Image (cartoon, grey):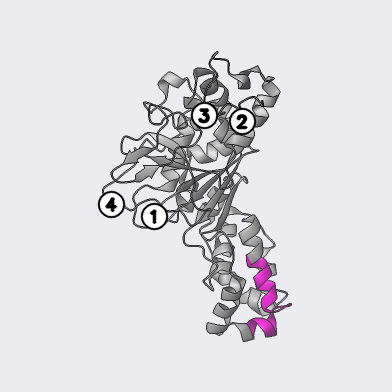
Amino acid sequence: MAAKIQDPSIPPADGVCHLFRLPGELRNRIYEYALTEANGLLYREDERGIGHLCLVDKPHGEHCLAASKNYKPSQHPRHLQQPGYPENKQPYKKRAHESAGEQGEDIKDDKLGTFNEANKLRFVSQQLFRETRGLGIRYNDISFEEHFDHDAYAMAQCENFLRSCSTKEMEHVRRLVISSSAYDMQRLLDGPTIIATFCRMFPRATIHYHLAELSGATSSILYQVLLATKVLQRRADFIKKVAGGSAKIEREIMPLLLWDEDLSQDGASLPSNIRFFPREKQMDVDEFREMLKTRGLSTQIESEVKGGIETWVQLVKEIFEHGF
């Protein structure tokens, strides 16, 4: 008679956890597989100012926080606080990636809805808590999003998250994705900010900042990028690419780019691992071509820009894929 197979969800009667009998290297592989999420993790704050790393139910750009004009995240001074100071001096009662329901249940908030908390393995046992602590940061991109009529500013949430991290955890951050409903580049230039200082300290990490006012659905996207790259003193070749070899278009663009030189100097100090992107995740090529025709720009572009409309299409694609 075949031996009865025990339900793997039921702990063995002798109390032995076979997972912990595996070599540490193999357990780490298991943790990486279990805690890596296809859409990364979403950082959210409850009304108490406690941060949570949550599962993302939709890809980047489609997920929004519930709108609430009465909710405001916990605010801290904008000037830099030294990251990685001892845990007992962290600003929060509980650190962002460790806070959750006491037994790992999803967190319910009257204004923000239900949080689908990530990494529930850490609630199984003390050893799993120790071994999986902070691994969500190591294996996933962390997103910070907001709704257009919501007061939970994504940039402020990102700053709060970085304040809550230890230096060791910061070393493992791969990418932070900020999707803002406000044009916050000026605030980054005002500095110093925790975000900019973090990027200087950890150059292998990247910040992808999706600017609400930069959209592939508008004919001004290339002009806006030209202004931004001038301020940031990046992509000196971009104006020639937009002009597409047309001296006439280049002459028309140059007066529009007269910008405050002091602001340009501030922009040059922003770390290069802060990258800016349009608010949409993917470019709608057909919509962009149709928009140029509707605005009456296609004829001029075809006649004066080398490569015609396709030159501009490729430039905008590059912005969507690599930022600036």
Q: Secondary structure at mark 2?
A: helix
Residue 217 lies, with reference to residue 205, above or below; the image says below
Q: Nearer the N terminus, badge 2 or badge 1? A: 2
Name which of mark 4 and mark 1 comes first in the sequence.
4
Q: Amino acid at mark 4?
A: Lys
Is there CB contact under 8 Å for labels 2 and 1? no
The reply to whether discs 4 and 1 touch (Cβ–Cβ < 8 Å) is no
Residue 51 can be seen, yes or no: yes
* Horizontal and vertical percent position of residue 65: 39, 50
Which mark, residue 69? Answer: 4
> What is the spatial separation of the Cα atoms under label 4 and label 3, in whole angstroms?
34 Å
Q: Main secondary structure of the magenta part?
A: helix
Q: Is residue 157 left or right of residue 34?
A: left
Q: Quadrant of residue 183?
A: bottom left
Residue 297 lies in quadrant: bottom right
Residue 214, position as x, y percentages in the image: 51, 62
The residue beneath circle 1 is 147
Q: Residue furthest front?
A: 1
Residue 31 belongs to the span the image colors magenta: no
Instruction: Give the distance between the C-alpha atoms of the residues marked 4 and 1, in whole angstroms.
Output: 10 Å
For the C terminus, give its image quadrant.
bottom right
- The residues tagged by marks 4 and 2 sit, at their Cα atoms, a distance apart of 39 Å
Number of the label disc, if any, that sits on residue 301: none
Kind of element beneath mark 1: loop
Q: Which is more N-terminal, label 3 or label 1?
A: 3
Which residue in the structure is indicated by mark 2? 31
Magenta-tinted stretch: 300-316
Dot 4 or dot 3: first in sequence order is 4
| Up/down of 76 relative to 289, above or below | above
Residue labelled with disc 3: 121
